[in-house]
Image (cartoon, helix red, strand yellow):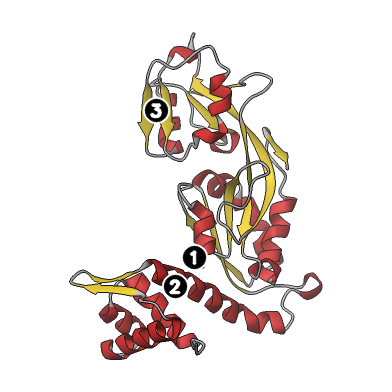
Amino acid sequence: MTDLAPQELRVLVAVEEEQSFTAAAARLGATQSAVSHAVRVCERKLGAVLFERGRHGARPTEAGARAVAYARRILRLLAAMGPEVRGAGADGGPVAGELRIAAFRSAAAQLLPPVLAALAARHPGLTPRVRIVRELGRGTAGEVADGRADLGLATLDAGGPPPVPGLVAVRLYQESYALAHPQDHPAPRGLPLVDWAENCDSYTKDWWRRQDWLPPATVDAEDDTVALSLVAQGLGMAIMPRTALLGAPPGLAVTELGPNPPSRFVGYVTTPELAGTAAVRALIRELRELPLPAGLTAA
C-alpha cells in the first residue's frame, strides 16, 4: 500500500463532514472530479470502499469512518509537529495555537471556566475551542478517538478501561450523588423522579437496589439543566451528581443520600500521541491544579 498524502487525508475529512463530493470540493477550492478522483485513489490505496455514493450525497462506510478518524488524528499531529519541534512549551514556556476540548455540559459550565482562565493567563497565545458533547454512547471519548478533540472531559468507570479503546484515560476527581428537591417540601422522596438521558444509571443502580423506597413515577427531561428547573418548580426530585448541582437555581434544596451515596469518577481522555504535546500538557496541568468544590474529591 502507498501511504496517503496529507491532501488526500484532507479530502477524506472534507467529504465526511460535508457529506457531499461537491460541497467538499467547494470547501477545498477544488473541482468535484478532483475530489472524486482523490477518494478513489484513497480507496485503492487502503483496499476498502470508504463512501457510499447516492442521491443523498456521500456517507462513510464503516471502513470510511475509521479512515476519517485516523485522517483527523494524523492531520492534527502534523499541525502540532512544527511547534513541538521548535520546543513550544519547553521548560514551562508559553504555548500557542489551537486546543480542542470536548466536555459534557456540567463539567464545561462549572469546571472549565476557571481552568481556561488560568490557561489564558499562562498561555495567552493558546486558543481553546470547546464543544459541548452529550455523555451518551461514545460521548466525549468518541470525539477524541475520531480526531475532533484533543482532550475530552469524560465520566470514567472505577478501575475500568478507557471509554473508547486506545485512549489514555486519567481520573481527576470523584463526585458523590445527592438528592435535589424543592425547598421546604415535607416529603421529597414521595415526589416523582426527574431523570435525563445522560444520567447513566450504572452509577446509581446498586444504590437504588439497597433502598426501601421507589419513586411513584419518572419524568424524563432533555438534560440536567431542565431536570433541575423542573425540580425547583416542585415537579419532582432528582438524584444528581455534585457537578450538576453547582449553581443550582433558586427554590432547590440538596440533601445528602446517607453514608454510602452513589458516586462516579470524572477525568480526561486523550490519545497517546497528543498526551505529550505542549498544549495538552498545559491543559492537564491546569485541570490538576483546579481547587475542587465541595462534594468532589481528588481521585
Label 2 close to label 1 by CB (< 8 Å)? yes
The residue indicated by pointer 1 is 146
Q: Position of residue 151 (x, y in %)?
A: 59, 61
Q: Earlier in the sequence, mark 1 or mark 3?
A: 1
Three-letter code, disc 3: Leu
Q: Which picture quadrant has residue 67? A: bottom left
Three-letter code, disc 1: Asp
Q: Furthest-left residue in view?
A: 55
Give the residue displayed 75% in from the left and 51% down from the top: 289
Q: Furthest-right residue in view?
A: 91
- How far is mark 3 from mark 2, CA to CA? 41 Å
Give the residue displayed 44% in from the left and 81% down from the top: 46
Secondary structure category for the residue under label 1: loop
Q: Earlier in the sequence, mark 3 or mark 2?
A: 2
Residue 116 appears in the picture as rendered? no
The residue indicated by pointer 3 is 230
Q: Is residue 92 left or right of residue 169?
A: right
Q: Nearer the viewer, residue 61 or 137?
A: 61
Residue 282 appears in the picture as rendered? yes
Q: Residues within 10 Å of mark 2 (few under 14, many from 20)?
A: many
- How far is mark 2 from mark 1, CA to CA? 8 Å
Comparing labels 3 and 2, the label whose residue is closer to the camera: 2
Three-letter code, disc 2: Val
Q: Position of residue 110 (x, y in %)?
A: 58, 44
- How far is mark 1 from mark 3, CA to CA? 35 Å
The residue indicated by pointer 2 is 68
